[in-house]
Image: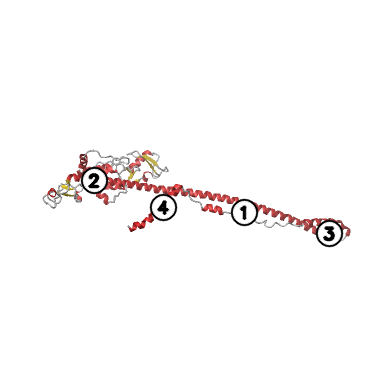
Amino acid sequence: ERDAAERTPAERLVTNTRARGGGPNLPLYNTQAAAQKTKQTCGVAHTHSHTHTRTRTGSERAGMDFQSNIIQDSGPMDNLEKQLICPICLEIFSKPVVILPCQHNLCRKCANDVFQAANPYYSSRGTNITGGRFRCPSCRHEVVLDRHGVYGLQRNLLVENIIDIYKQESSSPRPIKTKAEQPMCVEHEDEKINIYCLTCQVPTCSMCKVFGAHKTCEVSPLQSVYQKQKTELSEGIAALVAGNERIQAVLNQMENTCKAIEENSQHQKQLLVETFDGLYALLEEKKGELLARVAVEQDTKTASVRGQAQKYREQLEGSAALIQTAISSMDEPGEASFLLTAKKLLIELSNASRLNAAERIEPGYENMDHFTIDTQQVEEILSAIDFDMDDEDFEDEEGGEEEEAGEEAERPAGAEQ
């Protein structure tokens, strides 16, 4: 391994990025160009796209031409600087850096300028106008913003971290690259290591191939193996970056799914509240209707009884007056005078006695039990209220339960193994 002073700026950049925790969970570049930028940094031409991949055509000499760029000091840093240029201000990204849904990066200030130009009535962050849209200056993809405007876009912390490291590396003096001494063979101290043993996967010298431990092994020139492994390493880096981007896309999808779940849940909760409020209103309406019917019969029966009672009161008053008149006639001293009024009084008393028979209220007239309602069936229906489940959803749930049961049945066997 080489000392830190002998590393190229690009190698120190990768080391510092890893040391600062620049993990794979933050997208560095857009999806279509991430692998290409990584391979340009290492000096290997590679193009990565969502819809197609470019197959290599040409001879090994073309690959050697690209690999020759690896030994240039300024190439990787220059290529990296090109990828850190904002397409609006044409300067290195200034913090904060925001990433658009199309995975292109912009300075937040530049993004705000583009947004303000596309939305002239959106004067400030505190305006009453919600949302807005503009087009990405790199791919013309339409970017739809929420009420926060460009301040609602996600910051690309990894790009900001790389910008800091790049500026630090650019400002620090580069070590003078001296020609590294070629290591010597351990078995033959006077021989330089100049070949690579493909069988043992170790570098060695020509004497080891002719007379030493590797005389029966298959060997190859050191330079060809060096270029091949450099290419493999570059491709591995590009593949890892592409894999990280796929993981990041999955993470973004999961985050969007969580947001959609929350929004859909709130919508369904609101529908449930409205549905039950409707049931409450229906019950209240029915309750008022039934109470009105009870009140009507109550008033009818009460009025009937009170009317009959008033009739009997009037009858009692008439009878009392007739009795008083009859008693007064009994005090008449003259026989002739008494007889003149007695016959009339006798007729009136007879009629009053005949009408004096009061009819009693029939038994149970006061009973209101016939207004009792049976709610058992309704209660059963209300208790059975549940969500409408499609057949496919029901089958999916049953399938999920069967899979869980199968996994639980397989766990003991797996534990024993």
Q: Which mark is residue 402?
A: 4
Q: Would residue 24 be found to the left or right of residue 225 on screen? A: right
Secondary structure of residue under mark 3: helix
Label 2 Cα crowd, 10 Å radius (few <14 / some 14-19 / many 20+): few
Nearest to N terminus: mark 4 or mark 1: 1
Residue designated by label 3: 329
Disc 4/disc 2 C-alpha distance (Å):
45 Å
Amino acid type, mark 2: Glu
Q: Residue furthest right?
A: 336
Residue designated by label 2: 232
- Residue 279 visible in image: yes
Nearest to N terminus: mark 3 or mark 1: 3
Nearest to N terminus: mark 3 or mark 2: 2
Secondary structure of residue under mark 1: helix
Which sits in the foreground, 189 or 332?
189
Q: Which mark is residue 270?
A: none
